[in-house]
Amino acid sequence: TPVVRLQDYAPPAYLVDRVELDFRLDPQSTRVRSRLHVRPNPDGPGGDLVLDGEDLELTALELDGAPLAGTAYKLDKDRLTITTPPERAFVLDIGTTIDPSANTRLMGLYRSNGVYCTQCEAEGFRRITFFPDRPDVLAVYTVRIEARASDAPVLLSNGNPVGSGVVAGSDRHYAVWHDPHPKPSYLFALVGGDLGRVGDTFVTASGREVTLGIYVEKGKEDRCDYALEALKRSMRWDEDAFGREYDLDVFNIVAVSDFNMGAMENKGLNVFNDKYVLASPETATDTDYANIEAIIAHEYFHNWTGNRITCRDWFQLCLKEGLTVFRDQEFSADVRSRAVERIGDVRTLKAHQFVEDAGPLAHPVRPETYKEINNFYTATVYEKGAELIRMLKTLLGADGFRAGMDLYFDRHDGTAATIEDFIGCFAEATGRKLDDFMLWYHQAGTPEVTASGRYDTAARTYELTLEQTCPPTPGQPTKQPMPIPIAFALLGPDGDEITDLKTESPAVRDGLIELTGTRERIVFTDLPAKPVPSLLRGFSAPVKLTANLTDDDLLFAAAEDSDPYNRWQAVQSLATRILIAAQAAIADGRTPEIEPRFLRSLEHTVEADALDPSFRAQVLSLPSESDIAREIGRNVDPDAIHGADQWLRGLIGGELGACLTDVYRRFGSNLPYSPDAAGAGRRALRNTALGLIAGTGQAGIETAEQHYRNADNMTDRMAGLSALTRQGAPEADAALDDFFERYRTDPLVLDKWFSLQATMTGADTLDRVTALMRHPAFSLSNPNRVRALVGAFAAANPTQFNRADGAGYRLVADFTLEIDRSNPQVAARLLSAFRSWRVLEPVRRAAAEAALRRIAGHEGLSRDSADIVERSLD
Ligand code: B3K
Ligand code: ZN
């Protein structure tokens, strides 16, 4: 497979100013006519006009109205080349025929439950018609869609509706859409189907009225209210926080049931995985609601960061994704609890991005080469990309950041930009040189920062030494030091932040240390007593921090730190120490030991009614087994880690029994369910307590069973059910059966049922998953089903996926090879579950490697999957 390199970027030879598309929809044979208004790019290299195309049947080709002679063009498997076209503007008419029903890759135009829909990012437009399918070719689109009125009464595309009618003498009708904003082909979208609609209006800050619509499969209209409200909140927030208004007369969202990822930001016509639109108290958990709000916001925010300013090439993907994730995280922090959002975002970052960065799939936030761009929609581009924006804001301050953003919007609106363009705006707006900041975009790997503090009683000084290193990653054996903003405070004996700190160090300013070199020594003077440092507050940089803090220091921080993030982190750090020691003890056949003050500290926090319940729930949620595996980092034995987890949970459930039962009782609510953050926080605390109570014996199991039965909303029902499945209690099977009967007609809810079973820790889970693959409710062609069952098993069941006998790997490998034939993107995603194989103990490591080698050697493996396994084995 050819490698695409950033350094080879060349501007397009031809530009397309306008596109007129004419679709005649048919399930098996859709006719597409495309008229391109082309001109040579004055800044381009000249030469042939090369149009990308894939799985297309060419039926017509005319230049300025005259059919092209066979000698004037060349048709290959993946492109159409017009040889030596005129050196002036011209019109190209192209006819193609495509088969949406046969499109199982779900890229281009396909059918989902009888609905015509499209997905074009990154390179799907070429599966609709021949086109320079690259993000730096921006055109104004006019789209006419014709279909049988009974098949597809609703016909949608980007932009504003400009016409519609019936086709005389036929059973067909049509609609015409015009999008005045020039856009790249990846933002094109079309939808046709018999859909229900929920509508509303939004008045922008400058008083323009926008018609909002959410389209869903008929019968699901009553599950759209929350998404619609979230959309309006997002539109308002972007005006308030970034000064960005919406810019078309309509904004439409369509929910479809077959979708490769979460959602897509097509201009004026966002297409969503229905999982991230549909919600009702009976079918969606609090987490589902929060995800819907965040993803609705994310796609909407792309209207400015992604659509109006797009990417010059796919290497710049983080230009839109990292920035837009940052924006959606800030939105969620503003409309919910900032501290709890931050804790959740960091948990996600560490669980996915840190793991990716530590393994064979590590890559810079802006990669320099790729074989398959779809494999770079990663935690590194998205989540680490967002952290870079957050650091930029920390370094420049809120005003400097806003000035840089304003300049960026102003200068690059309507263009396809680069990271250099973006960072350049901040440098120019603030006068600060940001050349060294670019290293964050170039260098992969998670920097490791060590901090050691020393108090000198006689001199009354506190000396803090900070050092950074960054481990080697594929293709990058050595690294340069990066600018790391470390938000900090020194806490006095009473827990208060010490104000007016005195130091000569130029690296320190106003609660922030800027670590720029490899090593920094800072001396604080005039301190009457030994302080406890609170470092990396709010997780101000995506680094691994190791500080020479004692258990006492951490216990102190857990009780006193005024930064809620660090308070939470202190408990996590203590729990991590305890769990790592415990799993080592278990592996050696010794009995693990507990630091009793850890339990008292937890108890203290859980009982502290002055603290937000959702924060307390986060404190009570221990590091996951994967978190511990990541921290150990070598020779990992998932069974020992699981043993340690069981042991600690059991201990907490027993020792904190009275406190947990008290919380469980007090936080039960008689109020009707409401998905807001406050209600969700109370449920989170109560349900976390329930999970621990359930591990304490038969009475606990009965509490969980009752909880399941009495639930009046999905959050509580799932909490009860997962408490039962987690214990592997015999009662779990009856409850699972009951759950299936209740929701048998609701595939999205059954996904929860599949996932719960896929993540059970018993040795029979493998057989259970194998059986579920043949369950009538399962479907190989629906990505949500596949992810719910096989994805959950591979990514969220550490002991059973990593079975020592290799059977977990074989199951996932066999399944992936099967699905690779129909949907390579989904297959490649599943394979990324193998990315940490090298850190396993030798027996599992060998078994995982054997599975990977078998996949790599498979004949006809897709480019997507081959890319993942080859890099994993490298
Ligand atoms: N931009 C899309 C992701 C497209 C993935 C293509 N394989 C959704 C988003 O990030 O908003
Ligand atoms: Zn995005």
Image: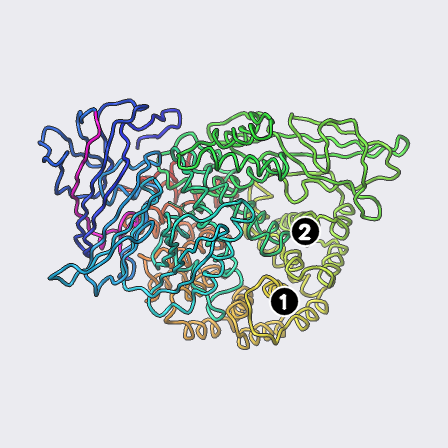
* Picture disc at residue 262: none
Residue on which the image places disc 2: 568
The x, y position of residue 856, in whole percent, is 34, 40
Disc number for residue 686: 1
Q: CA distance from mark 1 to mark 2?
A: 18 Å
Relative horizontal placement of residue 408, taking residue 131 as reference (left or right):
right
Q: Quadrant of residue 254?
A: bottom left
- Residue 538 in the image: state x and y as whole percent: 65, 45
Residue 457 image position (x, y, % from top left): 89, 34
Q: Nearer the viewer, residue 96 or 415?
A: 415
| 427 is higher (above) or lower (below) than 394 | above
Query: Where does the image place residue 144, in percent across and percent down from the top left?
Result: 23, 51
Q: Which residues are magenta?
A: 88-111
Query: How many numbered callouts?
Result: 2
Name the quarter where the N terminus is drawn: top left
Q: Position of 694 compared to 815: left or right?
A: right
Q: Amino acid at mark 2?
A: Trp
